Image (tube, helix red, strand yellow):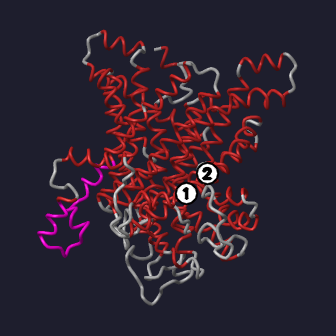
């Protein structure tokens, strides 16, 4: 019951944070230098039309009034209208959501599936060469800019050696996407037993996902290592050892569980970096997600689109963070509230 | 008298203690060397670089690395080697500027929150929560997109996203240090709170702040280069690593790899330098990590 209470409180606390987030995204439109109307309508508009637009965009009302209207619109799923396409930004982003979600999630899975075992190995063989190598790999990962490693890898693997598929999009257009169920090509192609599509989707995603995932592997690895070391040095482990339990059993059955909890929190933190990095990686690989959309919007000075993206991505991040926090709560018997 | 007759084994002045410790910490040392080399190259760029940073040569465009152009030239005929060295000026300026501002503002917020507690603490920290609810690169992107791409705006945006890190760090320090004997003693002596904060609490927090700053500086360079790469930061023809990579983007296909390769290597090396410093120092400060 207490757990339920905490979870409920945690979800309720989301409201003020999100409200603050909307305030900041709203304030961003107010710090744009110059007249917002000329930005929307272009320079060649009559004064009468400008006044009309000013009224239509509520720019003749006080600041707080505009903000209330903004939040009211958001509550109805209105993220504004793109200046370039005239389409609703919310619609444009939703259409691209699954591409970004598939890319960031695959990247996350990669970094966790490689980072966690490496971290554990480093903890078991503390100060050995394994420890040293994983540390160097981790530092390289957080130091190399994703947009550069993406470029260099596609130069080598596609243009030079032809072993990767071209860095253009989610799937070979000759194969075509699988039947739409979740919007995630890998999942949909498995669900529909469309192996040709799976193969094409996988060969398109592995390189960008690797590039993105590699950039966040270090913190996951680091926290797994530290968690494992602490679990191994903890009194219960010593007791188990004294009782004659096999070392492999101690690691896999007992220490691992405790070591994994902080990893969960780190994964939540790292997800924000993945979303940020996706803007760069999608640009490099022409990945048709929200990141590429925002890149194009920046190029065409489509500020409502940029603003919508910021809010959309941040909400996504906050929700992923919350879900992982609740998962932590469900998994850790020690947490009491 | 006795003191004078004792042989002096070690110089215990702080500088020497620091240097001795550094020698036993090859990770930090290698990071320091990298950052120092990059900084020196940037500072003395006019003496080292064979050309000017914006000196194009229409007769020598898209040339592969050679003796006259060690890193090749780009489509305008700019010398990549020259621009890579000059690029360090802007990127280091952004890193130090943004981290410095974030440090000053963030520490002030954190100290105020931690020291005054209650409502002040609540208000300041909720504000920080809001800022850190954003993925940092995305918030910085939004700020620069709104303010317009320029060097000061870029520094401001990156500083802004780093403020919560320092606020949290210093608040936590203040809360733990506040209970320490020497701070309680200082407070009991009736010293003003601000004085206790500045003279007793802050000097005892510089180590974690410094470590944090090296890591933040590395990330600041990645953010600055990333933003410039997507057109939200430094603009062509100024020499900045992210912009340089962008200007080589379309030439990857036709095989002119050097335009992007060298500035990218410069970013990776410099950021790695900062990360190595921070990583090594963390080992020293945090005994759990050994």
Is B56 positioned to the left or the right of A266 in the image? left
* Residue farthest toward the left in the current orientation of the protein: A47
Q: Which mark is residue A105?
A: 2
User: What residue is at 54 percent from the left and 66 percent from the top?
Assistant: A288
Q: Is residue A34 magenta?
A: yes
The number of discs equals: 2
Is B193 positioned to the left or the right of B219 in the image? left
Q: Is residue B153 magenta?
A: no
Q: Name the N-terminal-most of marks 1 and 2.
A: 1
Is B97 positioned to the left or the right of B2 in the image? left
- Residue B98 position, x and y percent, is 37, 49
**A325 or A66, nearer to the observer:** A66
Instruction: Relative to A193, say whether A299 is above or below.
Output: below
- Residue A134 position, x and y percent, is 69, 46
Write down the residue under mark 1. A100
Quadrant of the image for the N terminus of chain A? top right
User: What residue is at 65 percent from the left and 62 percent from the top?
Assistant: A205
- Per the rendered image, the range of residues in magenta is A25-54
């Amino acid at each position: 019951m207490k757990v339920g209470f905490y979870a409920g409180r945690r979800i309720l606390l989301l409201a003020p944070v999100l409200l603050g987030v909307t305030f900041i995204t709203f304030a961003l439109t107010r710090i744009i230098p110059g007249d917002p109307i000329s930005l929307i309508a272009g320079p060649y508009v009559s004064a009468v039309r400008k006044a009309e637009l000013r009224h239509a965009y509520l720019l003749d009302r006080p600041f707080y009034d505009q903000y209330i209207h903004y939040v009211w619109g958001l509550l109805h799923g209105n993220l504004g209208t793109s200046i370039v396409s005239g389409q609703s930004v919310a619609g444009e982003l939703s259409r691209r959501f699954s591409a970004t979600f598939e890319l960031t999630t695959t990247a996350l899975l990669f970094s966790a599936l490689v980072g966690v075992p490496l971290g554990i190995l480093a903890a078991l063989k503390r100060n050995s060469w394994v420890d040293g190598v994983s540390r160097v790999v981790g530092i390289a990962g957080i130091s190399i800019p994703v947009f550069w490693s993406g470029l260099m890898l596609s130069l080598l693997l596609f243009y030079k050696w032809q072993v990767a598929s071209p860095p253009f999009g989610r799937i070979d257009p000759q194969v075509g996407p699988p039947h739409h169920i979740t919007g995630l090509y890998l999942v949909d192609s498995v669900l529909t037993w469309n192996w040709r599509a799976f193969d094409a989707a996988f060969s398109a995603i592995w390189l960008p996902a690797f590039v993105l995932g590699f950039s966040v592997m270090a913190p996951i690895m680091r926290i797994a290592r530290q968690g494992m070391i602490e679990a191994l040095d903890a009194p219960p482990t010593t007791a188990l050892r004294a009782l004659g339990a096999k070392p492999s059993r101690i690691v896999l059955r007992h220490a691992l569980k405790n070591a994994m909890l902080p990893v969960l929190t780190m994964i939540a933190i790292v997800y924000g970096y993945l979303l940020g990095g996706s803007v760069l990686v999608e640009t490099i690989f022409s990945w048709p997600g929200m990141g590429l959309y925002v890149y194009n919007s920046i190029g065409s000075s489509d500020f409502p689109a940029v603003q919508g993206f910021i809010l959309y991505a941040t909400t996504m991040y906050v929700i992923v963070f919350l879900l992982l926090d609740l998962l932590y709560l469900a998994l850790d018997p020690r947490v009491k509230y | 008298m006795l003191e004078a007759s004792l042989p002096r084994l070690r110089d215990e002045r702080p500088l020497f203690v620091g240097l001795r410790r550094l020698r036993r910490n090859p990770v930090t040392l290698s990071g320091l060397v990298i950052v120092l080399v990059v900084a020196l190259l940037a500072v003395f760029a006019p003496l080292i670089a064979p050309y000017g940073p914006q000196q194009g040569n229409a007769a020598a465009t898209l040339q592969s690395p050679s003796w006259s152009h060690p890193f090749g030239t780009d489509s305008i005929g700019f010398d990549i080697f020259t621009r890579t060295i000059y690029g360090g000026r802007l990127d280091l300026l952004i890193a130090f500027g943004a981290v410095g501002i974030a440090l000053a503002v963030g520490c002030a917020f954190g100290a105020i929150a931690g020291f005054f507690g209650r409502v002040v603490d609540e208000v300041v920290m909720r504000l920080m929560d809001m800022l850190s609810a954003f993925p940092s690169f995305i918030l910085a992107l939004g700020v620069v997109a709104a303010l317009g791409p320029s060097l000061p705006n870029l520094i401001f945006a990156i500083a802004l996203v780093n403020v919560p890190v320092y606020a949290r760090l210093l608040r936590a320090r203040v809360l733990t240090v506040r209970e320490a004997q020497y701070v309680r003693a200082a407070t009991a002596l009736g010293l003003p709170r601000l004085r206790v904060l500045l003279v007793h609490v802050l000097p005892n927090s510089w180590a974690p702040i410094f470590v944090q700053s090296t890591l933040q500086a590395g990330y600041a360079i990645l953010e600055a280069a990333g933003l410039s790469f997507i057109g939200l930061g430094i603009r062509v023809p100024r020499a900045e690593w992210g912009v340089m990579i962008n200007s080589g983007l379309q030439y990857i296909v036709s095989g002119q790899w050097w335009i992007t390769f060298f500035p990218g290597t410069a970013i990776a090396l410099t950021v790695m330098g900062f990360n190595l410093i921070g990583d090594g120092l963390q080992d020293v400060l945090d005994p759990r990590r050994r």
